Image (tube, grey):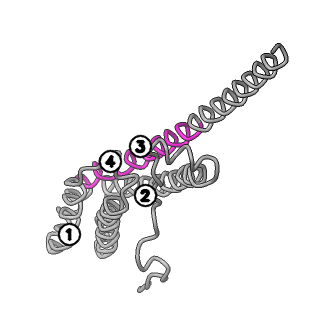
Amino acid sequence: MNKKLSVGIVSLIVILIAGSLLLVWGISTYNRIVTLDEQVKSAWSQVESQYQRRYDLIPNLVETVKGFARQEREVLENVTNARARVGQLNVSPQVLTDPQAFSQFQRAQDGLSSALSRLLAVVENYPTLKSNENFLQLQSQLEGTENRITVARNRFNEAVQSYNTMIRRFPGSVIAGMTGFGEGQYFQAREGAEEAPAVRF
């Protein structure tokens, strides 16, 4: 009887130790996923911040150009309309795991980038505007913002890659599946971006 009792106690201790180790492993994995998820959210907030900076600069740029390029009304309207489409988007945290919403967000931002590129190309026809101090300052800020957007998007993609790798690899995939963590979305290159733009002088 004594021998059976001691075997039972040893078995119970082994089960408790194994269960404790499994629990510690599960908590550790969960905490790592949460950390990576927060890094994705932090990187996303940097992307949004840079897009907001660009969004805020556009009215000043358009007003500065308006005075010089009255006949370029269509280009100015395209920029204003693209900015309005971006402003109408309701970007919630769920956009990070919803491929359709993320794609819609990216299309709107790409449309704004394209409209701004056309606006800056039109400015080439106005030497007085190109030398205007206000315009030069706005153009410099806009170019700096575009660079910041690129850097923020790259950092976001790196954070998403780390997070997605963690939730797709075993054993993280088990914990992610049990706790509802979904795959994050990447920024993709704009359609046609692989082709070199035509340069005309």
Q: Is residue 42 left or right of residue 103?
A: right
Label 2 sits on residue = 146
As drawn, 135 above or below 38? below
Range drawn in magenta: 32-60
Q: What separation in Å lies between label 2 and label 1 (alpha carbons)? A: 18 Å
Quadrant in the picture for residue 115: bottom left
Residue beneath disc 1? 78
Residue 49, image quadrant: top left
Q: Is residue 147 magenta?
A: no
Q: CA distance from mark 3 to mark 1?
A: 27 Å
How far apart, in angstroms, are the residues tagged by discs 3 and 4?
10 Å
Estimate how packed mark 4 is, as few (under 14), some (14 to 19) or many (20 or more) residues with alpha carbons within 10 Å. Answer: some
**How many neighbours does mark 3 have within 10 angstroms: few (below 14), some (14-19), or many (20 or more)?**
some
**Marked residue nearer the N-terminal end (3 or 1):** 3
Q: Secondary structure at mark 2?
A: helix
Of the numbered discs 2 and 1, the one sitting upstream in the chain is 1
Residue at horizontal 32 percent and vertical 48 percent from the top: 52
